[in-house]
Image: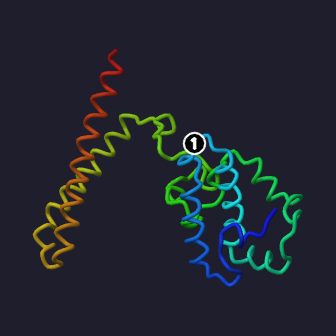
């Protein structure tokens, strides 16, 4: 293992922003998608990612600076072994922050890594006629109340009318979806 500062091409007194900028520049240059089939570029990318993993985290960087670097600094650590065996080969550390936007909406697997880009209808609860009828009543009430309060919303211009219109459209959309769901479930019962 080499000196992480040399790998990223920054000085030991570099700021966090300078380290992040150096990492982004080198990661863009050596990323395997930009260099398909180039084993040297892939290895360089792994080294850059490992260096940024340590230097990009303030506490890891302090420990690294205190202990120095050596040929076997991380070879026996479980974190390094986990990095080597990780199936997420090119996304070990997110340079834009550790907070994943989609984790906010994922109730079941907020701490695990998975693909959020494909919508799976199998995970959705099965809706019944009762659910669709409740949705019809609630969304209809929402549309009616937003329609009634629209005339008073001008007192809170410009946000009042915008909110009322958005609530009305959402209510009407929900009413239409619930009617479609009621007809769909009725057809499936008949067949």
Seen as rendered, the residue at the extreme top is: 191
Q: Residue at x 24, y 47 (%)?
A: 173
Residue 144 falls in which quadrant of the image? bottom left
User: Residue 29, image x and y in percent?
Assistant: 55, 57
User: Residue 115, image x and y in percent?
Assistant: 54, 45
Q: Nearer the viewer, residue 189 or 35?
A: 35
Seen as rendered, the residue at the extreme left is: 151
Q: Is residue 106 left or right of residue 143?
A: right
Q: Is residue 65 left or right of residue 57?
A: right
Residue 148 falls in which quadrant of the image? bottom left
Question: Which type of secondary structure does the marked residue at label 1 adopt?
Answer: loop
Relative to 47, is 34 above or below? Answer: above
User: Residue 155, image x and y in percent?
Assistant: 14, 79
Q: Is residue 18 left or right of residue 149?
A: right
Q: Residue at x 67, y 60 (%)?
A: 49
Q: What residue is pinned by disc 1?
A: 36
């Amino acid at each position: 293992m080499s000196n992480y500062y040399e790998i990223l091409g920054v000085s030991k007194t570099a700021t966090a922003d300078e380290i992040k900028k150096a990492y982004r520049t080198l990661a863009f240059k050596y990323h395997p998608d930009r260099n398909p089939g180039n084993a040297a570029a892939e290895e360089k990318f792994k080294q850059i990612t490992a260096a940024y993993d340590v230097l990009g985290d303030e506490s890891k960087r302090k420990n690294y600076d205190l202990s120095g670097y050596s040929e076997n600094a991380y070879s026996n650590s479980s974190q390094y072994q986990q990095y080597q065996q990780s199936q997420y080969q090119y996304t070990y550390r997110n340079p834009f922050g550790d907070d994943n936007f989609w984790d906010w909406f994922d109730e079941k697997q907020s701490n695990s890594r998975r693909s959020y880009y494909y919508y799976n209808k199998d995970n959705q609860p099965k809706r019944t006629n009762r659910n669709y009828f409740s949705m019809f009543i609630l969304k209809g009430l929402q549309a009616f109340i937003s329609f009634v309060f629209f005339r008073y919303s001008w007192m809170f211009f410009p946000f009042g009318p915008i909110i009322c219109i958005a609530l009305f459209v959402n209510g009407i959309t929900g009413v239409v979806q619930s009617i479609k769901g009621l007809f769909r479930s009725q057809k499936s019962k008949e067949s």
